[in-house]
Structure formats: C-alpha cells, structure tokens
Amino acid sequence: MAEIVGFHVERMIPELEQMKRLRLFKPEEISEIIKRRKEFEYKIERTMKEKQDFLTYINYEVKLIREIKLRRDKFRISEKKDEIEYSVTKRVTKLYKMALSYFKSDVKLWMSYINFCTQTRFVNTVSEAFKQMLQVHGDKMHLWKYAARWELEEMNNMDAALNVLKTGLHHHPDSKELHAEAFKLELMSGSQKAKNAKTDDENNSRQEKSVLRAEVHFKSSVKAIGDDVEYIISLLEIATEFDFTEKLQMLIIEYLTTNCWKSELMWHTMAQRELKGHHYDKNKENKSRIQLCVSVYKSAVKVIPTSLMWEKYLDTLIDLYLDKTKKKHFVKEILEQALQEAYDAGVLLEKHYLMWIEMLEDQPKQLEIMVMATAALPQSVKLWITRLRYHIILDQTTQVRAVSREAITALKEKSLPIYKSIIQYYNLKIVNSFTEIKALYEEGIVQAPEISLELRPQYIEWLLLMKNIKVARQEYEKIVRYTPYCLELHKKMIELENGKTGALCLNAIRNVHKLACQQFGKDNSDVWVEYIKFELKSGDPRLVSDVYNNAKNTLNENLVSTFAAEFALLNTSL
C-alpha cells in the first residue's frame, strides 16, 4: 500500500512545484497539501472501501480548485493552468471513477460526477458517464430523460438527445414522459433544421419530414400506452406550439373525438381550443370564439351529462364573465341559462350557486336561488350563511330567526357560524335581546363539541359584559362540568378574573386552576405550570410544593420529566 501511495503522491509533484513557483501557495501550505493527500490516499487504498473516504477526498480537491482560482484572481496570475487546474480536475474525475467502480448502485454519486464534469466542461467524459450510468440504472426512467436533456441543452445535439430517448423507450416502452419528450424533440428537430433551409421548398420538406416522424411516434406510443386521454392531449398541446403541425393536430383530434368521446377532459380541451382560436371546423370561423366554445360544451353535456362536465362548462363561463375584456352582458346571458340548466340537471356545486346569487341584481330572484341552493345542498355552510346574511342586511328579524333555525337543523355539528352570526345580529340590532341571546348560548353550549367548545368561553365573557363577574362565575361553576371538558373555558375565566376591576379574588382564581388540573392534569403539564405561576406570583407560594407533588402524581409518566424541567426553569426565572 505504501508503494502505491508513494507512486500517486510522486505524480502530484509537478503541479505542486508549479503552485510553489508561481507563489500561489507558500511552502508550508504545499507541505500541508501533500500531508492531506497522503492521508486520503491511504484511506482509499484500504481493503474495505468506504464511499465517504472518496467523497471527502473529492471535496478537498474541489475546494482546492476554488482556492486556486481565488488566488489567481487576487494575484493576477494566469500561467500554467493546464499543469495545475487541469491536473487537479483530472484527479477528481479519476477519484469519481474509482468510487463508482465500487459503488455503481449509488445514483447520487453518478449525478455528482456528471455535475462536476459538466461544470468543468469535461463534456466527453459526461457523455461516457451517462452511458455507463444507464447501463447500470437503465430501469430508472427519469435518468434517460435527464441524459436526453443534457445532450439537448448542454451540447445542443438534438439527434443525440433523440437517440437517448429512443434507447430509453426500449427499456420503458410505456413511459408517457419519454414518449412525450421524444415526440416534442422530433418537432423541435424539424423546426430547427427548417431554419437552416436555403429555399422554401427545402424548409417545407424538412418540416413535413419531422411531422411524419412525430405522427409515427404518436401512433406507436398510443399503441404502447393505450387511450390515455391526458397523455394524448399533452401531445396535442405540444404539437400546437409549432406552426407547421396543423395536419398532425387534426390527426390527434380525430383520434380523441373517435376513441375518447366519453372523457370530460377531451370535451373540455376541444372547447378550450375553440376559445383560443384553434378551430376544429374551419367553416365556422365567422362565429365568435366564445360561441364556438359554448357550442362544444353544450354538445358535451348532452353526450356526458356528468357533474364534472357541467363543472368544467360553468367554470369556463364564470371565468369569461369575470374577465373584464370579454362582452360581459353577452356572457352573462349564456351563464344564467347554463346555471338554470345545470340546476335542472341536479349538478350545481356550491361555488356555482354562490356565483349565481352574486351576479343577480334582482333581490327576490336572489332569495329564490338561495332557497333553491340550501334545499339542494343542505350541508353547505356558505350557502346558509349567504341566505342568513341576506335577511340580516334587510333587517328582517322574523326571517332571520326562521332561517337560522332551518340552518342549525340542517347543519348540525357544522352550525357554529350560524350561532355566531345570529348572536352577533341580536347584539347589534335587537333591543333588550338578553333573554334571546342567553337562550341561544344555552342551546349552543350543549351541542356537538365543534360548537359547544367554542361557545362556552364566549358565553361567560358575554355574561360579564352584560351583567357582572358574579353572574359569570355562577354560570362557569355550572357549565364547567359539561362534557367534553373545555380547557379554553378555564383560560377565559382566569382571564376575566384577572381583568376585572378591584382586588383579585384569589380563591376564585385558585378554584379555576384546581378544576383545570382536575380535568386536564393527566395529559397536559401546562395547566400545572400555570397553577404554580399563579401561586408564586399572586397567590400563596407555600402551596407550590403541594401543587408540584400533585402534578407528579397525576401526570402521565412520559410527561413528568418535561414538567419537572419546566418547574426548574420557573424557579430559576422567578
């Protein structure tokens, strides 16, 4: 091993002498470089190879290259780059090759090697590295795509990129990504070659040849993959990017309309193409894009009247309606008609009802749609809130009461926003509404947890505002026993006790802390910490020891150490 290491270090001497002669590094720095390299060489020559040894060595050499560049710039030295940087770079590539000979299965190591060679412009090495990597990792589809992209973007070699993809397709014949990439490159190749044509005939010939190759690729890929609508549409979108592919586009469209007519996405794509000006029937070009688009959608919802098809149709119309550059009145008429038809078909979604309501200017008609909407989708919180707000804005108290009752019955555990809206309305609009609001709170605090846990703290705060702390305490003592227990109720009561004017009622606050610990002290260490903070700061510090011991006896075992640490910090800070 010593002989091999000595041989390798000896071959480094010329570059080190040049570094020294050019004064890029001081003699002691050169000695340090030799020492480090020897250490690295011994590690990589060991019988048991470790990948990290190679990576550490490579990282050291890469940093050395950077340092050389910095010093060249600083001292304005440009000589002997081939004998110094090139030599070090070559060593790094050799280290990568050695590492990869032992760790072929590591894709990240291959990619690191390729990235290094790309950055240092060792392009021939990169091409070879890709070939070697794909021989080992040909089962990984994304690597074929990456290799093709490198040939195209780094080497500007479209033919080589196509060859990589075609080879990759032998390994992955049903890969949509590789097929789509190859299809696009065929057209890009034709476009690029056509630019270099000397005559129009030559230009057209080259474009036609690339279209024919793309057509062959389309047919073979569909045969391999099947009638995958998304994939076929992706090819259509690629073809649309090129201005010489009209026949190819028509071929793909014919295939879609013949074989994929049951697909909502197919119809949606055809309609959107009309909207963008890519007309299927050239005889109808005198009609507006919007008319042609709508015509396709109307045919679509007759052929496949699914909720998804209607959704795509309505969403498109809504986008057009909201687009200020479009004829809003014309689109509005079409949209209103489509919404009514979709309602009749029973396929309107929440967002469509909301849009329908918003676009109407006639209030009675708005209310009619709201009633229809909540009847069709009784579990929609937004629709009930919209209907309730309609009556609140018009200050129709009777209707507010009736609709809120309907909504609470329909929404059940989701009716918290209804309770909050009606309580707010009573607070702001109704004189002497204490009894009604109290009744609402009393009803809400015994509902499902999604409602009750939020309303309980609000309830006692409202009682304090409307009455006094005594009334709030009495109600707290009552509802604190309701299950499931509510931690926020305890927190709110403590906040109210601390915020009231006059002297603190320590026993009342202590009682709240005790109840919080009784109900939550097994799984929550914070309630104990807050109790201790209260006794230390405002209560009786002599009680802290008892609280601490109770906490340790009550808490789950996995929380005791955390609590003890928090308690220690608490003592330190206080």
Image: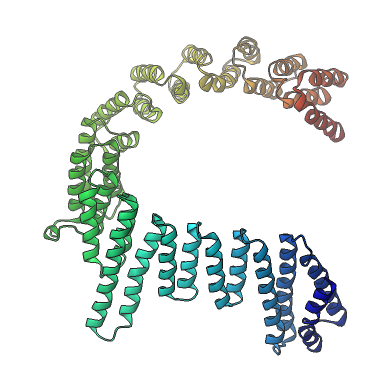
Residue at point 30%, 51% (across, down): 323
Residue at point 27%, 73% (across, down): 209
Q: Is residue 546 left or right of residue 247?
A: right
Instruction: Please say whether residue 89 is visible from this viewpoint.
Output: yes
The residue nearer to you, when weighing 374 against 17, is 17
Q: Position of residue 353 (x, y in %)?
A: 30, 34
Q: Is residue 286 left or right of residue 186?
A: left
Q: Position of residue 288 (x, y in %)?
A: 17, 56
Residue farthest to the left, as pictured: 283
Q: Quadrant of residue 408?
A: top left
Q: Is residue 185 above or below residue 487?
A: below
Where, quadrant-wise, is the C terminus in this rendering? top right
Q: Is residue 421 left or right of residue 398?
A: right
Q: Quadrant of residue 360?
A: top left
Q: Is residue 548 left or right of residue 488?
A: right
Q: Position of residue 370 (x, y in %)?
A: 30, 28
The residue nearer to you, when weighing 123 against 384, is 123
Where, quadrant-wise, is the N terminus in this rendering? bottom right
Residue at point 29%, 34% (across, down): 357
The residue nearer to you, when weighing 307 against 370, is 307
